[in-house]
Image: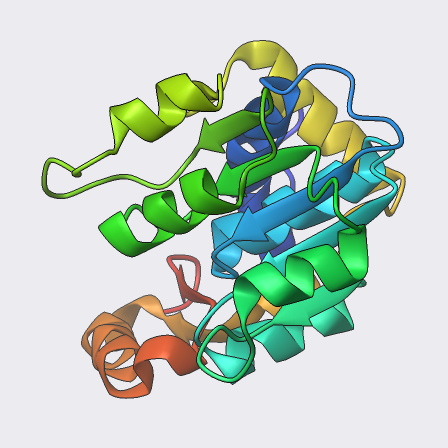
Amino acid sequence: CVKPTEIHLAVSMIEPCAVAVHAVSRGGDIKGFKVLVLGAGPIGNLVGQTAKAFGAKAVMIADLSDFRLGIAKEVGIDFIINPTKQDLSEEIEKVFGPDKADLIIECVGANETIDAAIENARKGSDIIIVGVFGDKPAVDLGFVQDRELRLIGTLMYQTEDYIKSIELVNSNKLSLEPLMTKHFPFKDYGKAYKFIDDKKDKVMKVFIDVTQE
């Protein structure tokens, strides 16, 4: 075992990558799929990238933040949608056609987004729930039943997801640098949290480097 003298900060992104890999894997073989991702934060972004790496035909991502949508575009997500400026349902049919998305992945954890997922899901399709809900969501189970939708939960990752994430990063299938908004030395950890509070939705990942004093 050799202790490395230097580790790139991007290595710490393997953990959220593993979350994304595990989530997308819950959808089975998605080669040729049209995938809709709701939420373009760090996890949603990585979910979108992972879907493309796993062979998705096209990936659309929706978010209220133009900053996060800009990052999504930078890393190669095919279609970006801001529901405050565009009608999500109309854009889904315009881009994916009347059959809509083959798979929807919710990465926010809010009533509004789980509702949007259910309302826009094609009959008989899957919705993977990645977002963590702080409060108990109100889900229209009658709608879920009528359309024979499958709600699939996902949490964290397993060993094989971590290994797969390393493989994807090593083969340049995932773009991590655009998600690394800023880093601070350990002594400035307070400034790091203030930066996050001040920037709000104009930040992706902030790093605190414990090797720097």
Q: What residue appears at the point 48 percent right and 73 percent down from the top-left corner? A: 83
In the rendered view of the protein, which quadrant contains the N terminus? top right
Instruction: Please give left or right for residue 166 compared with residue 193 in the image.
Output: right
Q: Residue 209 falls in which quadrant of the image?
A: bottom left
Instruction: Please give left or right for residue 62 compared with residue 208 in the image.
Output: right
| Residue placed most toward the observer, 213 or 103 | 103
Where's residue 82, x and y in %? 53, 75
Where's residue 120, x and y in %? 52, 46
Where's residue 93, x and y in %? 71, 56
Above or below 213: residue 149 = above
Instruction: Please give left or right for residue 61 compared with residue 170 in the image.
Output: left
Above or below 66: residue 122 = above
Q: Is residue 186 visible?
A: yes
Q: Residue 118 falls in which quadrant of the image?
A: top left
Count the marks: 0
Q: What residue appears at the point 47 percent right and 68 percent down from the top-left corner? A: 204
Q: Is residue 154 visible?
A: no
